[in-house]
Amino acid sequence: MIDLLWLMVDALLVTLLLILGWITCASTDIKRGITLFTAFGLLLALIWARLRAPDLALAEAVIGAGISGALLLRAINDHKPLGSSTPQRSAWMTWSINLMALALFCVMSWSMWLTLDQVDSTRLSQLVLSQLDDSGVSNPVTAVLLNFRAYDTLLELAVVLTAVLAILALSPMRSAFQPAGVLLTGMLRWLVPVLIVSAGYLLWVGAHAPGGAFQAGAMLAAAMILLHQGGYHSGSGLNLMLLRVLLVIGIALFVGIGLVMMLLNQSFLDYSPGWAGLLILVIETAATVSIAAALTLAFVGGRPDGWEPVTDSSNPSNSAEFNS
Amino acid sequence: MIDLVAILLIFVGLFFFLSGSIGLLRLPDLFTRLHALAKADNVGLACVAVGVVLLEASLLASLKILLIWLLIMAASSVSSHLIARDALRREQADD
C-alpha cells in the first residue's frame, strides 16, 4: 500500500517534470521561460531527493533552482535590442532542428540502454564503499569527488574558471542596483549571516554527510548576489587583487597539492596515507571560495572598475538601474 | 491521538495551498493573486510545518523545520512586497 502510494508520488513528479520541461522550452516569452526553468530545477531537486541522492538534490536546489535563475535573468538584460524581437525561423529550419534533436535523443537513449544492459550497476558503488576507509572522508560522494576521481573535479573547477574568464573578457561590468528599500535591507541583514553560516556548515559536513564545496560555494555566492541586489556593490570597497586571488585559489591549491603529492608518491593527486582527510578539507575550502567568487563575478558580469586601466569613456557603475 | 492531530493539520495546510493555487489561477489581477498566494504560503505552510513537527520525534529536526518555516515566511513576504511595489510603480508610470 505504502509502496503504491510512493509510486504514485514518483509518477506525479516525473510527469510534472516532463510537462514543465516541455512548456519551458515551448515558452516564447524569455522571462517566463526562465521562471519556469527555476521551477523545473526545484522539481528536479525533489526528484534527486527521492532517488536518495541528497548531494545532487542540494546542488540542484542551490545552483539549478537558485543561482542559474538569477544569472539568466541578469543576462537577458544585456542585449535589449537583440532580445526584444524573437528570431523568425522558416518551417523547414524548425523541422530540421526537431529532427536532429530527435536523432540525438535516440542515439543517447540507445547508448544508455547498451550500458544499462552490459554494466553491472552495483560494481562501482561496491568498489567505492570497500575503499572508503582509505579516502580520508566517510561520505562516499565526497570520497569520489575529491579523492578517487579528484582529476574530474579539478577539471570541473577549470571549466568554471574558464567560463568566468570569458565573461570577464567579453563585456564591461553590468550596472549596479540602487540601494534597496527598508524591508529588503532588513531581511538581508539577518539572511546573509544565516547563508554564510549555512555555507560553512555545508562545507564542513561534506566530509561525512551530504554537502561539499560546490553546494557551499554556490550558497556563499547567493549571499553575495543578494547583497549586490540590495545595492551593496563591491565596486569601490572590494580589494580587486584579493578577488583575483580568490578566483584562482581553488584550482591553484588543487594543482599545487597534486604536484607535491606527485613528488612524494610518484602519482598526481595521490594523497599520502593519513593526510587525505586534511588535504581534502583544505582543497574543498579553497574550492568553495573560488566557486563563490566565480559565480558572484558571473552575476556582476564583466571587468569590475579598476581591474585594469579603464580606457573606455563610459563608466558603467555610475548609471544606477532599478531592477526587481 | 497526536498522529491524528498532525495529519489533520497537514490536510488543513494542503487545503490552504490548494485554495491559494486556485486563487492564483482565477483571480483577476496581480494584487489579488499575491493576496491569495500569501495566504497559502503563511497559513498553509504553518499548518504543514506544525503537523510535520508533531510527527517528528527528534528535537533537532523539529528546529530545522521551524527554521525553514521562518526563512520561507521572510522570503515570501519580502518578495510579495517587492513584486507589488514594482507593479504599483509601473502602473503609476503608465498613468
Image (cartoon, coloured by chain):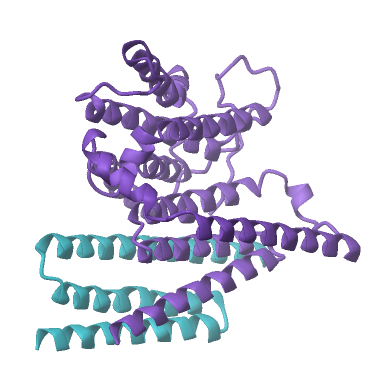
Chain colours: A purple, B cyan
The answer to whether A106 is drawn above or below residue A230 in the figure is below
Asked whether the viewer can see residue A179, the reply is yes
The answer to whether A46 is drawn above or below residue B32 in the figure is above
In the image, taking residue B12 as reference, residue A98 lies left or right, namely right
Instruction: Return the x and y of residue A196 as percentages of the image width and height.
Output: 30, 41
B16 or A186, which is in the foreground?
A: B16
The quadrant the N terminus of chain A occupies is bottom left
Number of numbered discs present?
A: 0
In the image, taking residue A114 as reference, residue A264 lies left or right, namely left
Instruction: Return the x and y of residue A294 as percentages of the image width and height.
Output: 49, 33
Instruction: Return the x and y of residue A91 as percentages of the image width and height.
Output: 89, 66
Q: Quadrant of residue A147?
A: top left
In the image, taking residue B93 as reference, residue A42 lies left or right, namely left
Q: Quadrant of residue A33?
A: bottom right
In the image, taking residue B80 as reference, residue A216 lies left or right, namely left
Asked whether the viewer can see residue A192, the reply is no
Q: Which residue is most to the top?
A: A263
Q: Residue at x 41, y 61 (%)?
A: A48
Instruction: Return the x and y of residue A119 as percentages of the image width and height.
Output: 48, 54
A144 or B34, which is in the foreground?
A: A144
Q: Residue at x 42, y 65 (%)?
A: A47
Q: Which residue is most to the front?
A: A118
The answer to whether A239 is drawn above or below residue A300 in the figure is above
The answer to whether A23 is drawn above or below residue A283 in the figure is below
B29 or A161, which is in the foreground?
A: A161
A33 or A160, which is in the foreground?
A: A160
Q: Residue at x 41, y 43 (%)?
A: A218
